[in-house]
Every structure is written in structure tokens, then in C-alpha cells.
Amino acid sequence: MRFESARVTEARVTGGRGPVDGLAITSGRGPHRHSGRGPLEGVANDDQPSDRGRPGREPSRPGQPEPAPSGSGPSRPEPSEIEPSEIGQPEAGQPGHGAIGRGRAGLIAILVLIGAGWGLGQPLAKIAVSGGHRHVGIVFWHMCVTGAIMGAVMVARRRSLPLGRRHVALYLMVALLGTVLPNAASYQAAVYLPAGLVALLISLVPMFAFPIALAAGLDRFSWGRALGLGLGLCGVLLVTLPETSLPDPAMAGFVPLALIAPVFYALEGNAVAKWGLPELDAVQLLFGATLLGLPVAAGLALGTGTFIDPRPPWGLPELAVVASGAVHAVVYTGYLWLVGRAGSVFAAQVAYLVTASGLVWSMAILGERYSGWIGAALLAMFAGLFLVQPRPRSKLVPRPHDVKL
């Protein structure tokens, strides 16, 4: 399960307007899609949001202000420029002004539910591997469930799937970098590491995305975000170096395996940011990537001997595989709705909830317990994530009319 940064999801949602920020979830992606989330990986640029699909308006050129509607006074800020504290707060004299608390409380409740659902992915992965199932075999059935749900959403929305050369290349890239390879690594890491620790390490996606974006020329250097990167590294060191940080010191050798997934998610996000989305929305992208990724995952599962026989009887590990795919599809769709309703900066806060809920779910369901070093690593990574995330006034948020769910 992936969580993609706000930038990532924005790219998917707005349908490809220049540098996209990481795939969403979303890719991701994610949330950490996500994020998301996932939720997404901290890639920033100054491109203006797209005006594609807005009747009666010409797209504004980069660096030029958008014209105000004729006959109107001073324009109100676009939803993408509203501070998180302003979410759900109508202006005085407008309908709903007295329901400020309810509107914002509702969005926060949805944010918490999405984070809790996304965080459930790692304990479910641990249950799946505890039954003897392994990486690519789990990925294949996870994609089957996700694809079925996304396909139903496509039918309900009466949207077709573009199949041009650029589209197919993008689907394949997303399938490999955003699903098959990172998920396989994450499931394999779950064999050797506590589920909560895997959830903690996946939160490093924005910190890996930032240096990749710098190298690709998609972002500008910032000392604050560089400090966030350093805090993320400190968090990893707090996990791996002290002998008492893990239940078994030998587990430290498998931490690099758990870091493969966030690296792939960061690569995916930056790739989408660089090449954009050719007339696609997020659901189309995820569905197309699933369709192309399924034969790849099936071939790898058969070739590695990890294919899972779907015939009954089904036990808890098999149910965990199905539940993981269903939960991912539901929370990812909910994350995209939240991005369009409240803005990607507000929705990006799900990253904290995904990590925290992953730890809490692992403790409640699996009975995991963590040392004080893991708590210190969590604080260091949260501080780093705060510094790396895009700021509220950055123009990284799609307008509500751009999100078509």
C-alpha cells in the first residue's frame, strides 16, 4: 500500500499539467497516495494550476495572474490558496457562516478515517505473510481486488480508458515503480520486520523525493527542507544503530529492504512530475496501471513460486490479502475526494496519521511493542516530514472542479 504526497496526487488529479508531483497514489500515491496518498512526495514547483475543463476561461500562462471575472470586485482566493485553518469557513453574511465548526470538523473526521484505513495496510500485510504467502503473490491478488473496485468506479462514472502510446507507457511505469516493485519489497520486509516499523519507514517517501527532484531539476534547494531530510536520516539511524531499538538486533540488516518501497514511490512521483499525465485523471491512471501490472505480477509470481492458489479453504492470511486490496481502493478514492474538497496541503497531513495509525494498529492487532528508540525515531521523522511537506500557500492544489470522482 502506498501513500503519495500532496504533489503526487495533484498531478494525477489535475490531468497532467506540466510537472506532476509524484504519483499518487497516491500513486499513492502514501498516504502515503497519498496520500497519499499518500499520499505525493514533497516535490514542489511553481506551475500554475490547470484551467482545463473550466468553461469560458482561457488557461493562464505561467507567471501571469488570472483575469478576474468581468463585473466582479476583488477576487476571493482560489480554494488551492486557502490556509488549512480556513477550510470549511464561509465568509460572514454567506449561507453556512454559522456552521464553520461542523464543516471543518467533518473534513478532519474524514482525514482521520482515511489515515486510519491506510495505516491498516501494514498489519494486514504482516498477517498475510504469516500464513506463508510472499511478496509478488500477494501483490497480484492485491491488484486484482483494487482493479475490480476501480473498474466499478470507472463504469459508474462512464469514463473510458485512453490507450494511446503515451498512456500505455505511463500505465506501465506506474505499475512497476508504484505498485509491483515497491509493494513486493514492502511485503518481503514484513516477513522480517515488525509491521509498525515498516509503516514508519514508508513515511520517508517525501524525504527521498526531495533530492530526486533536485537532481531532476523539478525543485529548488531549501535549507528548511534539507533539514527535514537530515531529520529523516536521523530517524533511520535511531532505528538501526542502537542494539536495543529492535526486538532482535539482526533485524537491522533488513531495514534497507523496507527502504526500497519509499525510494520507488519517490521515483514514481518525480517521473510523473517530469512527464505529466496525458489527459488522465487519478482513477483512470490507477485502473490502467492495474490492468498492465496484473500480467507482470502474475508472471513474476509464477516464476518465483509465490503464486497464491485462490481455491478454498480460506484462512485469515487469505482474507487479509483481499481486505488489503479493498481498503486501499476505498481510502485512495476518499483521499482524492478530500484533495478536491479541502486542498492537497490539508490532505497531505494524512501522512502523519498513516504512520501513527500503522503503529497503533500493529500494537492492537499484532501485539507489537516498541522501544524508546522507535519513539524517538518517530518524532524525528514527523519533524522531518513537517519541514519537507509543501507549505499552505504553495500553488500545488487542484481546484475542486478538476477532481472528477
Image: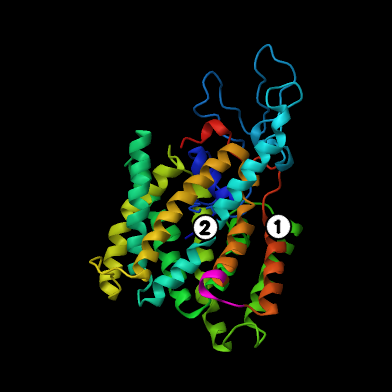
Q: Residues within 10 Å of mark 2 (few under 14, many from 20)?
A: many
Up-down relation of residue 256 to residue 354 (above or below): below
Q: Give the range drawn in magenta.
A: 364-369
Q: Where is residue 180 in the image (x, y as percent from the top left)?
A: 39, 63
In the visual, does 352 lie left or right of 24? right
Q: Which of 169 and 347 is in front in this view?
A: 347
CA gap between label 1 and label 2 equals: 19 Å
Whether residue 308 is visible to the viewer of this picture, yes or no, is yes
Residue at 58 percent of width and 55 percent of height = 41
Residue occupied by mark 1: 386
Side (left or right) of 97 relative to 128 = right
For the point 58% across and 69% down, the residue is 201
- Residue 368 falls inside the magenta stretch: yes
- As helix, strand or loop, the secondary structure at mark 2 comes to helix
Instruction: Specify the farthest residue to the left.
Output: 311
Which of the numbered marks, if any, corresponds to residue 358? none
